[in-house]
Each structure stands twice: as structure tokens, then as C-alpha cells.
Amino acid sequence: MNKIWLSLAGIILAFSASAAQFTDGKQYITLDKPVAGEPQVLEFFSFNCPHCYQFEQVFHISDNVKQKLPAGTKITKYHVEFLEPLGKELTQAWAVAMALGIEDKISSPLFEAIQKTQTVQNKADIRKVFIDAGVKPEEYDGAWNSFVVKSLVVQQEKAVADFQLQGVPAMYVNGKYQLNMQGMDTSNMDIFVQQYAATVKYLVEKQ
């Protein structure tokens, strides 16, 4: 009997220690006004944002989050247009990628073209990134002005307004929790990435 109680006590302590890793106001912030109807895990970013480039391409935080999430949980990414240049055009281009289901195919080359090679200066350059990534010109052109893409642009803009977004990168869970990078350990990036991903998993399961 003593062994059983000790075992149970160990489980309770382990759970408490795990739960104690995540504190409202530290690793995450509960929103004063939850936003209904948004994706379960929503990430805002901009191709013009150097921090977003590091977030995605250097530290691969989104990929680490994906690995920790329960099966079937998706990260939805919305582009913001308030960072120039070409903020609106890039948001529309991201809507094209969403409509064609090629977000993973386009994200890296578009980040590289804007943040590293700086070869994107206009709409034609954005189009070229898609074509070089294997998208047929007629497919891209047809999607650009389609109803679906226009709807996805509005959807992204509405989410930015509803969350009263101030900066990127930013991630929200269940429309009511915002990840708080300032409350995490940034002294070691490996630890930070794992802590960030674990916090998202905790919030997804917290409901």
C-alpha cells in the first residue's frame, strides 16, 4: 500500500512540476477579450520582418511547435500588411499560397528573396519567386485575382484587427492565449525553442 501511495504521490508531483512550468503572464498571456472563430493555433508574420525570418528560417520554431502538437492540430499562418515595402502585395501573395496549398513550398524562397538576396522589389518579382518554386504562371495569375484569394486577404486583415495586433512574430492559441516570448528563457536558444513549443502544446491541451 505504501508503494502505491508513493507512486501516486510521484505522479502528482510530476504533474504539478510540469504545470508549474507554464504561468499566465509569463510564458503566455490570457487575452482580456478572446477572439472567437479563429484557427486553434494562429501565427502572424511578415516576410519583411527580420525577427520573423529568424523565427522561421534560423531557429525553426514553427517546425518545433508542429512536432509537439497533438495529431491533427494545424498551425495557420497569416501575413500582416503593416510592414512595408509591398505589405499588401505580400499578404495577397501569401493568400495565393494558402489557396494553392503551397505555404511550405513558398515560405522559404520568399523569405530568402526578401531578407537575404533582396531580389523582390515589385509584384513581378514576387510572381517570379512562385514560378521558380514550380508554380505554373497561369495558375498563379488565375489565383491572384480570384474570389478565394480576395476572401483570404480579408480573413487575414480581419484577424489582425480583431487581435489588435501590434507586432510580429506573434502566436495565439484558441483565440484567447498569446505566447509571450519576453517571459521565456532567451539565454539559450535551444532551451527557448523547446520552451516555446512546450508552451503552445500546453495551451492547446488546456482548452
Image: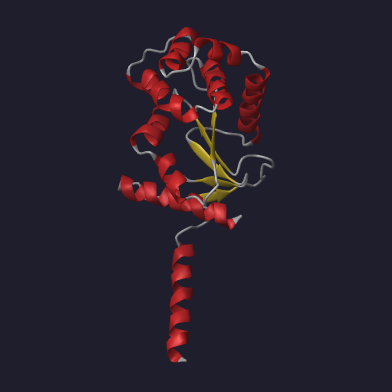
User: Is 151 or 23 nearer to us in this picture?
Assistant: 151
Which x, y percent locates residue 29? 55, 49
On screen, residue 12 above or below 204: below
Q: Residue furthest left?
A: 188
Which x, y percent locates residue 143? 59, 16
Residue at the image point whose x is 50% and y is 57% from the top: 23
User: Is 10 or 158 nearer to us in this picture?
Assistant: 10
Query: Can residue 27 be seen from the camera position used here?
Result: no
On screen, residue 14 above or below 166: below
On screen, residue 100 above or below 9: above
Residue at the image point whose x is 56% and y is 21% from the top: 96
Which x, y percent locates residue 18? 45, 64
Q: Residue furthest bottom?
A: 1
Query: Does residue 33 appear left or right of residue 189 in this picture?
Result: right
Q: Which colouring convention does the figure follow?
A: secondary structure
The quarter of the picture where residue 159 lies is: top right
Q: How many marks?
A: 0
User: Is 44 or 105 nearer to us in this picture?
Assistant: 105
Residue at the image point whose x is 55% and y is 46% from the top: 73
Which x, y percent locates residue 80? 54, 26
Of the 4 image quadrants, the one containing the C terminus is bottom right
Query: Does residue 83 appear left or right of residue 191 in this picture?
Result: right
Residue at the image point whose x is 53% and y is 24% from the top: 97
